[in-house]
Image (spheres, grey):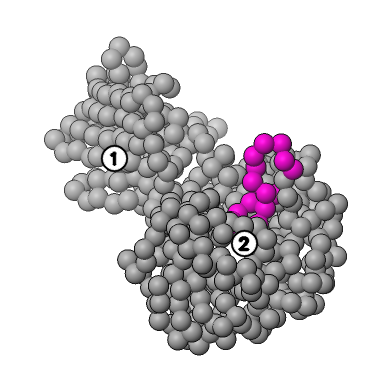
């Protein structure tokens, strides 16, 4: 019994010693922080805002003005700065657990399809399957943060200086627009590193008053919406393809006998070569759009198919399958263009086919108006006589395409362009541009230049 009593005393003594060590450690960490100065600001589309916070060590307490700041929160913030750098965003650090994914997998929904009530069951199931997969969501993370994430009219900034009792200091800063304001630039003991550590953000937000400029962003608010937005954009092509399968499956089955369907969707959009403008009360034209490839086409050359869709049926599949080969053959038979394609495999070239021809009725109407606007009615007259045999090529990156026409004698006409990526072997300075009559091009215009079969610029 005496032995047990001695053990009890020894145990209590050790416990008291450990407690004193912990208290001493906390006090030591409190004492090393002299003050924390936080400068937080924002500018952009709206009223600029700024705040300066000064958290001062007053013995056992930290004060922000007259308000107390929990010393444990200060300690946690300092501890977060000493943590190892996180080189890239990751699910665990952001708190995106499996349970979080399951809780948030119901949205948002594609802007093309509307809400969940307008989406087929198989589309909803696909979205949830993707969102519930940690490996899928992990691949989305780089798109949420700098250097890949950026938008205009939103310019946050924060700089934190920590002055220590020994005269040294540490700093923390960010201009990130993203949730948690990641990444941070951290300077401790004269060494600076960048880190995507959300623990720093959480710890910093914890010592800031709730309505401080940028605090909501620093605390991670908006992360859920940002992930869902990126997920929706990434899954959207699959959802659109499923929608097309649901509504035009028979047509796609016939097309797949000769082609690989890269993507497909059904919508009522309009462009210079297809669709009805959304003006007045006129009905929209709903079309099945599909990007198609096959082994006979070079890499990066595809067919851009547009067929009118009515009552879950796509019209004109047989006509397309019977006539598309002649357009492909003519486009690839131009010697200089063929050589260009072989040597520039990264430039996308799409052979347009709308309803019943490559140069369809809508394209012809817009082309005629554009040529009249730039005083090239002669081209319109020539083209009308061979419209059904003319190939419309859409060349270049999305939203920066050039529209080229391949005539039956293998001359080509540059109709219009909206950027250098689709000008083939030429530069913008090689052409005289003018404002188009319709569907204006912000970074180019209408041209009407003719290229000889051997690749010489004629006019």
Dot 2 surroundings within 10 Å: few (below 14), some, or many (20 or more)? some
Q: Residue at x 65, y 58 (%)?
A: 362
The percent position of residue 237, horizontal first and vertical second, equals: 66, 57
Compared to residue 284, the image places residue 72 above or below, namely above
Checking the image for residue 172, the label placed there is 1
- Report the front residue among 355 and 408: 408
Q: Secondary structure at mark 2?
A: helix
Q: Is residue 36 above or below residue 392?
A: above
Quadrant of the frame with the N terminus: top right
Q: Is residue 158 left or right of residue 275?
A: left
| Residue in the image at 46% along x and 74% along y | 450
Q: Nearer the viewer, mark 1 or mark 2?
A: 2
* 30 is within the stretch colored magenta: no
The residue labelled by disc 2 is: 364
Within the image, what quadrant is residue 24 found in? top left
Could you tell me residue 192's position as x and y percent?
A: 25, 50
Q: Is residue 312 visible?
A: yes
First in sequence: mark 1 or mark 2? Answer: 1
């Amino acid at each position: 019994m005496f032995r047990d009593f001695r053990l009890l005393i020894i145990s209590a003594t050790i416990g008291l010693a450990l407690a004193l060590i912990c208290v001493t450690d906390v006090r030591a960490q409190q004492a090393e922080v002299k003050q924390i100065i936080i400068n937080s600001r924002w500018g952009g589309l709206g009223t600029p805002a700024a705040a300066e916070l000064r958290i001062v060590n007053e013995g056992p307490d930290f004060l922000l003005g007259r308000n107390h700041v929990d010393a444990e929160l200060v300690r946690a913030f300092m501890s977060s700065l000493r943590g190892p750098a996180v080189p890239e965003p990751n699910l665990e650090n952001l708190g995106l657990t499996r349970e979080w994914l399951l809780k948030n997998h119901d949205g948002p929904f594609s802007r093309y399809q509307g809400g969940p009530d307008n989406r087929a069951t198989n589309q909803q199931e696909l979205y949830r399957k993707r969102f519930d997969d940690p490996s899928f969501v992990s691949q989305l993370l780089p798109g949420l943060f700098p250097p890949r994430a950026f938008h205009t009219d939103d310019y946050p900034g924060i700089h934190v200086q920590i002055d220590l009792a020994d005269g040294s200091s540490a700093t923390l800063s960010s201009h990130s627009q993203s949730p948690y304001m990641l990444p941070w630039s951290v300077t401790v003991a004269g060494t600076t590193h960048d880190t995507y550590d959300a623990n720093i953000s959480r710890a910093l937000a914890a010592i800031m008053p709730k309505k401080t400029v940028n605090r909501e962003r620093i605390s991670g608010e908006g992360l859920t919406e940002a992930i869902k937005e990126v997920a929706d954009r990434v899954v959207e092509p699959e959802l659109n393809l499923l929608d097309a399968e649901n509504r035009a499956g028979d047509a796609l089955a016939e097309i797949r006998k000769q082609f690989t369907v890269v993507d497909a969707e059904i919508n009522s959009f309009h462009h210079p070569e297809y669709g009805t403008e959304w003006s007045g009360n006129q009905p929209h034209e709903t079309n099945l759009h599909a990007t198609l490839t096959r082994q006979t086409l070079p890499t990066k050359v595809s067919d851009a198919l547009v067929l009118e869709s009515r009552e879950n049926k796509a019209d004109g599949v047989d006509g397309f399958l019977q006539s598309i080969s002649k357009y492909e053959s003519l486009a690839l038979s131009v010697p200089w263009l063929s050589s260009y394609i072989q040597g520039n495999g990264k430039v996308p070239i799409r052979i347009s086919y709308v309803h019943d021809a490559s140069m369809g009725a809508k394209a012809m109407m817009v082309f005629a108006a554009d040529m009249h606007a730039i005083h090239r009615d002669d081209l319109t007259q020539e083209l009308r006589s061979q419209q059904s045999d003319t190939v419309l090529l859409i060349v270049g990156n999305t939203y920066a395409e050039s529209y080229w026409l391949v005539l039956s004698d293998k001359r080509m006409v540059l109709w219009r362009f909206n950027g250098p990526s689709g000008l083939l072997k030429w530069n913008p300075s090689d052409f005289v541009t003018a404002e188009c009559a319709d569907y204006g091009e912000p970074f180019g215009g209408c041209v009407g230049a003719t290229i000889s079969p051997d690749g010489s610029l004629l006019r």
